[in-house]
Image: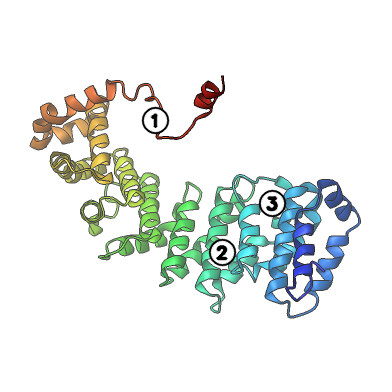
Amino acid sequence: MAFAKDNDALNMKAFVLLCNISPALREEFLKQDRIFIKITKVINQKPVPEILISRIAAVLQSFIFGHPRASTYMIGFLLFLIEHIENQCVFDLFSSITSPSFQIKEFAEIFAQLKFEETIIKELEDPNSSPEKRAHICYIIRNCSKNLYFSKYFHSQVVVDALCDLIPLNNVYADGHLWQAISAICDETTQEMMEGILFKAFQFVIIPTHDVHMALTCAWDFIGKMLLLVGDERFGESFQLPNVAINLLVQFPNNSNLVGALFRYIRNALKIPGYCTKVLTAFVPFMITAISENEKTAASASCRMFIGDLTVLRRIHPEANKAIKNIDLFHNIKDDFVDHYFECLSESYGGEAPPPQNNGVITLQNLMRITD
């Protein structure tokens, strides 16, 4: 009944009960292969209706998370479901299993034997795949790259090339997840593989925009990571990245996600000899102006924190110290902002909570007084 094609009330109750049965009964079902046999019969009846695909995914998720290691033999069903990953229940199943917080070594080993990464890349490259399907697959790649047991299978040239070939997807939702996946797999093992993507990232972030979406934020996050890995003072030289970043901070001062990505790029720049001077020369005057205007935005708050940190960092960072010595505005702001900033940081704040206001409501304490 739980896997019936129609959606009447009785079948729905059977489905809900199956997803929420007791651990002991779930274990008994697994021992006798009842779920395995039933799902096999359902998926052999092609085509499988969308409602049954959703129910299969929900039941598998219930059993896998109820008894993870006892459910490993059911992983074969997951390969059947990959082609339906645009289905929300199927996506929820895969995103849960590949989540960095769900790390079961046996699952990753079986997925590897079944060539899970090849199957998922094949679906990603399918020209008939919808933007939603590609977005979901990119999210799974992002998950796998952060999962201890899955990551080694996704930090590969095959995955990098597949993602690179998709840029751009020309869909806000899909492009956001694409760049999120790209940023997630960026590390020491993939740096050299991602030179082609880096050039596309430079081309993407310099395009003028009237809106900020996840793609732009994740592209800057990726650029910040690659800057640290490449370590070249000529990084993105022809694209004038500092000026592009300043324009975005002016245009979108309250987009905290974008502001965060831009400041990670700036802070990473301080670790690159030669590039550090270029970035400080471009950004410090802008930051001081933003602080002086005294506007309450995410960008100005980040500027305050950065300038405060820079006054401390300069003592142990010769290049940074030399760079800001040549910026007159920095010396002018010391008395007006820096000293006061550190005084504010050292002051206590908060205090005891004020007594609660009654506002005509009889509290338990008042009720006890009344009844005494």
- Disc 1 residue type? Gln
Residue 101 x %, y %: 61, 44
Q: Locate residue 308: give its quadrant.
A: top left
Q: Residue, x 85% and y 46% (percent of image)? A: 24
Of marks 3 and 1, the one in the foreground: 1
- Mark 2 crowd level (few <14, some 14–19, many ≥20, 10 Å Cα): many
Q: Are marks 1 and 2 in contact (CB under 8 Å)?
A: no
Q: Are marks 3 and 1 in contact (CB under 8 Å)?
A: no
The kind of secondary structure element at disc 3 is helix
In the displayed structure, would residue 301 be above or below residue 338?
A: below
100 sits to left or right of 336: right
Residue 159 numbered tag? none
- Mark 3 crowd level (few <14, some 14–19, many ≥20, 10 Å Cα): many
Residue 137 numbered tag? 2
- Disc 2 residue type? Ile
Residue 113 visible in the current orientation: no
Q: Which of 279/342 is in front?
A: 342
Residue picked out by circle 3: 108
Residue 50 x %, y %: 68, 74
Residue 88 visible in the current orientation: yes
Q: Earlier in the sequence, mark 3 or mark 1?
A: 3
Disc 1 to disc 2, C-alpha distance? 52 Å
Q: Locate residue 62: give its quadrant.
A: bottom right
210 sits to left or right of 58: left
Residue 355 x %, y %: 39, 24
Of marks 1 and 2, the one in the foreground: 1
Disc 3 to disc 2, C-alpha distance? 17 Å
The kind of secondary structure element at disc 1 is loop
Quadrant of the frame with the C terminus: top right
Residue picked out by circle 1: 357
